[in-house]
Structures are given as structure tokens and as C-alpha cells.
Amino acid sequence: MKKLLLFLTISLASVQVWAQQVSINEAAGWLESAYVKWQPVANAQSYNVYYTGMGITDQKIDNQLIRSYGSYYRADIPGIKAGAYTVKIKPVIAGVEGTSSTTASITVKSHDRAGFAFSNGRIPGAYNSEGTPKNGAVIIYITETTKNTVSLAVTGATPSPSVGLQSILDGYKKGKDLRPLIVRMIGQITDLDYMLAGDIVIENNNAAASYITVEGIGDDAVADGWGIRIKNASNIEIRNIGTMNCNSGEGDNIGLQQSNDYVWVHNCDFFYGNAGSDADQIKGDGALDSKKSNYVTFSYNHFWDSGKSNLLGLSEGANPGYITYHHNWYDHSDSRHPRVRYYSAHIYNNYYDGNSKYGSGATLGSSLFMEANYFRNAKNPMLISMQGTDIWSGSKQANDAGNQGTFSNEAGGSIKAFNNTLDSSIGTNSMRFVAYADPNPLYNIAGKINSTTDFDAYVALTRNEQVPATVKSSSGGNTYNNFDTNLAIMYPYIPDSPEDAKTKVMQYAGRINGGDFKFGFDNAVDDTSYAVNIPLKNALIGYKTTLKAIQGEQTIPTSSQTLIATTNNISQEVAENTSIESIVLTWGGDATDVTISGLPASGISVVKNTSAKTITISGTPTATLSYSVTTIGTAGTPTILSGTVTVIPVGSASGTQIHNFTASIKESSFYNITGNMNATAGSVSYSDLALTARLKIETSTTITYTTTNESTLTLVFDNTFSGKVKINGTNYTASAGIITITVPAGNNTISKGDTANLYYISTEYKTTLGVNDNIQTKKIILYPNPVTDYLNISNSNQNIENVMIYNMNGSLVKTTGKDIETIDMSHLTPGNYLIKLQTAEGTSNQIIIKK
């Protein structure tokens, strides 16, 4: 009867845990990404999120991609191919996954990779052309909490590891670390402790093999108060970020400063910066400027009432570059869409929406191809400096070059226009546009103006029509260079109609779903005003994220109840009959106390010190257990930290048993060692260890141990040893001083074959994570173990197809691509990790300790 009652109790407890199920609020695909929102589940300490589609099954996403917004949770999945996917969410309660909830099929679309940034076979950024991370890409997460402490060991950087975002970027500045770098921003991020004149600066010494992406996650990633500057850089991508209240020395929200090429900035929101010292900087300096850079694409960006949107060129002179602006939303922005010196600029499918000063402007020999843009009540859609509408005085009904220059007094450039829509139905901006040789008498007044000299653009009848060399700017006599009809220069693209472009821009420009910041313009007022929009300005100054917490991270400053793991070891793995390291949690802020779930239990005790506001967890666990600590208080949002203590039985399949004679002589809780140590020290380097102490393998020597599963045994001898050692009665021959074989479960014995000196023993179990893997008999060596920064892979006979790294909770924390020789583990927290190496011959699993 007692057994029956116990069985029923356990069964009911299991039902209670597994009955908890996520209620999905919303799920959708976006551009090479997807997201899902759901209601919180009572008592859930965390959530696991998986996605399936396009050849991927139940791929677990990183913890940082799962965030709490108080009344709901959200997970984003960046870096996936276009196609159909489903997303599965499982609550985790007391360390156990609850019942999963799965979305309906959602559709993910591709980014539009048209433009000069993709010339010459380049794919800017650390993602492939189909949307997935490039092979070997390193991913770091930047939040308000981690912005100054995130670390990465960067090749060639000093000191190492580099700590803080700018320090990491400084490391890449030398161009020696060629691993693709993905920087993922989460939430509202204010000024970092270390910046360069108020900017985060991206450089990589123009290394053609270096690729960097800086991106926002979800719809609310914000660079608040600082700018992004790019210089001496190649293959750079910036996407899905909102920039506001910029107060940097350069003044640009995002600026290409000098000597850049193959740069792609897209799907960003550009808001007001802080006012500068000049009168025309009342809304901040440039929103997205480019100087002395080549092969650039700016696309699908949203400019919110920017004063000066896009300056292009400075003093390039005889060395112009190529740039594309497409599908940008110039939303009541005033001017410079763009304003161009010297460059060849393809400007197509943009939506000019209530612009109070002018659209695009051409100076100093520049060539602009304005194609299939939609101008809604945009004053002066196209201007060439010092001619046409630029210097026309409506009141005088004459040119007035001395007083009327709208945007420049520099010599003119050239504009070719084709298939643009000029929509001035509201008429409040008095839209004026003069086509070359337009016979309209308004543009041909004897003695005053003539449309063959005072024009705003040459309007082509076909897309491939060339502008004749006889068409010149009035000031400077510059001609159009017809770059757009040169097949050696232009890229493939398919333009939308202006009307379709307007619809697409309003749907996709800016961050995901238009971003979290919402503001409605009043066209009747804002179409013609270039003053600061006070309600918009106040909303930006007062902007605060609604993000509450990031999974796996200590609570961010938006919560007034704080809980901090001061010892950074809230989850541990220990051998059987071994004490854990003491875990200390401290509460504060508006938290008045804490509640503890899951403890005391299984040999682990808890001591609460209410005066010091600490929780201390210690003891020797008798079984694996999970726990959580939750703050309580009359004000603020509760904070939860959860951990797991995992017990590894001696000889179990969860760990690797290593004996280093240099460190431990003959003392071991796993191996029973009899024999004599060699009185003379040797010298062998293995697994990044300097080995000197050695056991003499002679007649009196035996090493016995017991395994519960099949395992891989590695023995390390003197480098010159090529003799035999007897293992379970069979002689095995060493190669360069190493023997690696598979041994069965059960009792095992190592004894003399030939006389030798033994430095090191390793027994590694063939562990799985719930899949039937074909374990390789040819050993792949991972070293050093323990590892601090870089894990090396040593085996010249096998080609690595894929490497997956799991923490001991079963969460996938990192993946790498083919044929790698090193794995960067510097960003992982200390602990044990399962490394799954996939080759053409099967899968090998090894446990690695991260220090």
C-alpha cells in the first residue's frame, strides 16, 4: 500500500508539472527571422524554444533570444533561410520540460540583397546570402547588463580576452581575426563605459576576408545616446537597430567615415539626435552619412523627421564610388535624400513622404539615377545645384542664384530620372519639377529661364536610355556618366513600380513590424514643417524599454527588485559524494525577502541571512536537483534566478575520467593504480599540459577500473615510445607515444606489454543527448581540457562537418561550420559542456570543462 501511495504521489506530481502548457499569443515570420509571443506559465523558471523547417528539426535557440515583457514572453529566431517553419515552446518547471505548444506554419522571407554593396561577389556581414551565419561565425550578445563586461578572445588583440563591445571591436581593427563576427543587441542600450568620442567604431583594416554584422534582436533594439561609426572597414552589415538621442562627437546616428567598402545598412530606424552647435543641426547631425566609401547599399531604412538624412561624399574629387539607396522611407524628413558630391548613386524605389525642403540633390559632378521612386507631397523632388528649381524664385519669377540656392552653391551634378511618381494631390508643398527640354511655358520664359539649361533632371523614356553628352550642368558643365547602363558596373535587380514600392516600404522599412516606437505624423502640418516636432522629441527623450528580463541573465535595471548571484556558479556539476561550491545570492532594491523553491533537498541546505540579505546554498548532493529563488516586495517586479546541481556517479556516462600523474601521482578515486613512479622526470606536452611525472609500466604495474558503458581509453607515454601495452589481455601498439582504443563496459585492466613510462590516462564515455549517434572509433582529440579560450581539434584523418556545443542542461549554446581546427569558447560561462563533432564517419561526443 505504501508503495502504491508513493507511486500515485509521484505520478500526480508529474502530471502537475507536465500539464503546464504555453498559450501562444502571436507568431510570424519576417525577413530571415521569426518570432513568437506567449503568456507566462505559472511556476515556470524558464522556457526552451525550438524551431523546425528547411531541413532543420527542433533546433534550440540561445537563451538570450528569450525575453520577458511582464505580461508576455517573446522569442526571436534570427539567421534562418526563407521558407516555412514551426516554433515549439516548452516551459521548464523544476528542471523538467513541460508540455510543448507549437505554432502553425509561419513563412519567412528573404532580405532584398540588391545594390552596389553586393558587387564583385561580396556578401557584406557575417551572414550568408541565404540568411544563415557564415561558417565559423562568432556570436556575442550585447545588453544593458553585458555591454561593458562581454568578453571575447580576439586573435592578435592585447589584452586577451577583450572585454566590452568597443574593446572587442578594437581587436578586430587589426584585421587579424577573420572569424565572422555577429554582434546582437537586445533592448535599450545606453552609453557604454568605453566608446570613441561617443561612438562605437567598427574597423577591420579593410580585410577582404573579414565580415562583421551588428544587428538588433526583435522590434525594440535601441542605441540610445550613441552613434555607430564605420571606418577602414570592409564587408560590414548593420541591421534592425533603432538609433535615437545620439550625442557623439561626429554627430551621425550611423556614419561611414572613411575608406570603407562593401557596406550594407538596412532595416534601421533613424530618430532625432541631440541638437548640434549649428542651426541646421537642431534635429541632430546626419542620420546616415557616407564619406570616402565605395560599394555601399542603404536600404529599407525609416527616417523619422530627420533634418539631414543622407550626406554622400565630402572631398573625394577624382575618386568617386558607387552607392545604392533603395526602399527607404523618408518619413517627413526635411532634406538630403541623399545630397551627393562626386558619387554615382542609384536611387530607386524609395518613398518620399511629406518632405519639407527637397528630395535628392546633385553637386560636384555626381551622377544620380532616380528610378521608380514615389514622391508624396515632397517639395522639390530632385535638384541640381545652381540651376533649375534650386535657384528659381517664385516671387521674382526669375533665377536668383545669389539668394535662392536651396541646398548648395557648389557646381552642379547630373540626374537621370525614369518612372518616378510625383504625387502632389495635397498641394501644400508646391511641388516643382522641371524635366530637361520640357516645353511647358512655365519653364521657358524668354530672357529668364530655359528648360535646356534650367532643368532638375533628364527624364529618360526607357530605363536603358543614355543621357547625351550635350546635357550638362549649368554650373561646372558636368555631364552624366551613364554608369547605370554599363553592364560591367551595374548589378542585377528588378525594380518595383513606384506604387508597389510605396506599399513595400511602409511594410518593411525600419525594424521588425515597424519597431516598438509608434508615432503618427499630422500631414496637414508636418508635410511643410521643418521645425522640431516637439511631441516626437519628447517621446524620444522619454523612451523607456518595456523589456523586463532576458533569460539566463541577471535582471536588468528596469526591475527595482534585484537578485544577484555573487559567486557566478548557480548551476554546478559535481562527482558523487563531492560537495558543491557554496552558492551565494544577494537580494536588494525593493525586494524585502526571497522565497526558495526546491531546497533544502538531497543533501543540499540553505541558510538565509535577512540582515545581510543573502542566501547561501551548500552541501553534498545525493541526487540531481533544481531550485529557484524569487524576490518578494511591496514595490517593483519580482526577480527569479534558477539553478541545477547535477550529480555525476563515479564511472557514469556523464563525465570524462582523467588521471594526470604530474598533478596527482597515483591518487585517484576512479583508477586503482599499483606500481612505481619513475624517479627521473620526463617531458611530454599533451592537451596543452606540460607533463613530467610518469608511472613505470613494468611487471609489477597494474591499473584497474570499472566502466558502466563502452568508453574510449587514451594513454599518453614518452613521445618516442612505439612499443606495446596490454589492455584487457590484448597488446596494443603506441603511435608517437599515444594509444587510443575503445574498451567495453565492465572491469578493465592495463598492464605491461613492453617497458614504458605512462604520464596520462583518459576514459571518455560515449555520451548521447537522446539520439542514437554512430560513435567514431577513430579518436578526435580536443585540447586543452580544461579550456579557457580556444579549444583545438586534432585529427588529420577526418573532416569535421559540424560542431555543436551543449551545456549540461541540454541547451545548444554554440554551433560551428565545416573543417574547423579551433573553437572559440571564451564567451561561455564556466562549467562542463558536451561537444558533439559530426564527421562523415559519424558523431563523436566529448565532455569539456570550461574554466
Image (tube, rainbow, N blue to C red):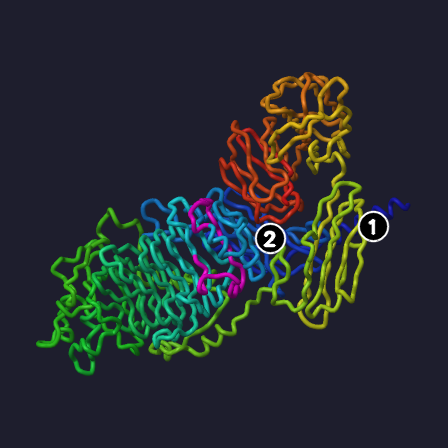
Q: Position of residue 168 (x, y in %)?
A: 50, 53
- The image quadrant where one finds the C terminus is top right
Q: CA distance from mark 2 to mark 1?
A: 33 Å
Q: Is 230 on the left or on the right of 80, as rendered?
A: left
Q: Position of residue 286 (x, y in %)?
A: 37, 67
Q: Position of residue 14 (x, y in %)?
A: 76, 50
Q: Which mark is residue 289?
A: none
Q: Residue at x 65, y 41 (%)?
A: 849
Mark 2 residue type: Asn
Q: Residue at x 55, y 52 (%)?
A: 151
Examine the rendered structure and indicate whether residue 392 appears above or below residue 369: below
Q: Which mark is residue 63?
A: 2
Q: Quadrant of residue 719?
A: top right
Mark 1 residue type: Thr
Residue at the extreme left: 446
What stretch of residues is rendered in magenta? 172-201
Dot 1 surroundings within 10 Å: few (below 14), some, or many (20 or more)? few
Q: Quadrant of residue 163?
A: bottom right
